[in-house]
Image (spheres, rainbow, N blue to C red):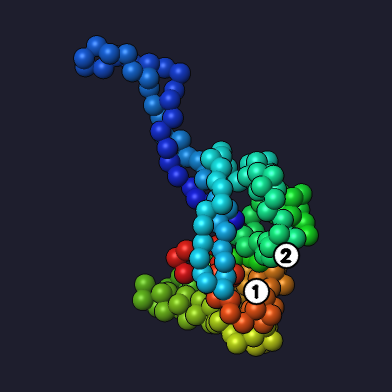
Amino acid sequence: LDAIWVTRLVQDKRTRVDSLGRVRPVKKKKRGAVLVALGIWPHSGRYHVLDWELAEGESGSDWDRLLSRLIERQLWQCRGLLLVVHDGGSGLQAALRRWYAEVPSQRCVFHKLRNVWQAIIVPEDSTTSQRRALKQKIIREAAAVFRASDERQAKQLMADFRERWYDTQADAVATLLRDQDDTLRFYSFLDRNRTWRAKAVRTTSMLE
């Protein structure tokens, strides 16, 4: 589950007369979110858009409209829904508690790493290349957590990251460690389902 933010043209209540004398509605740009439910079959990597909702934002009520339709279509745990992957937005999490409380959740590691990147602090007197090198070094170590051989190694790498960077990058460390269980949950699924593809269950981003 994820939202894609777009700009669209919407009709205003006003009208105007064009150069040919025709009365035209005035249109304006408006930002909005396309809430998307993407079904993924992790053993093959096949995916399909199940449903989508054009919304004002990502509030719980916005997500309610989409999730309620999935429930009406009998997309339930007992019918094969094993895991919900999402970015951890508060509105979506509230809606999931209402509609899919029994289904395990996985926090998207792409969003997690993006948040870690934004939390990295670089020295003010560093050059552009030094800033880039430091951030890339830190983010590579953070990303290694999600490419470990199993959950045990992932937790060890997470502990190593904390020990190495806590004194100078406390915010980045806190961001990586936050919601640890939800972020590392995909390892238990991969352990029980050896034919599953990791990228199908650890991120909402098709960029991976």
Question: Viewer-proximal residue, 3 or 156?
Answer: 3
Q: Quadrant of residue 173?
A: bottom right
Numbered label attached to residue 186: 1
Q: Quadrant of residue 152?
A: bottom right
Image coordinates of residue 90 in percent, x first then y, are: 68, 52
Residue visible at 50% across and 65% down in the picture: 46
**Element class at badge 1:** helix
Q: How many marks?
A: 2
Image coordinates of residue 75 in percent, x first then y, are: 68, 53
- Is 68 placed above or below 132 here? above
Numbered label attached to residue 157: none
Image coordinates of residue 123 in percent, x first then y, are: 48, 73
**Residue at numbered disc 2:** 104
Residue count near mark 2 (Cα–Cα under 10 Å), binned few <14, some 14–19, many ≥20: some
Does residue 121 appear left or right of residue 88 in this picture? left
Q: Quadrant of residue 145?
A: bottom right
* Marks 2,1: beta carbons within 8 A: no
Regarding residue 79, the answer to whether it shows in the image is yes
Regarding residue 205, the answer to whether it shows in the image is no
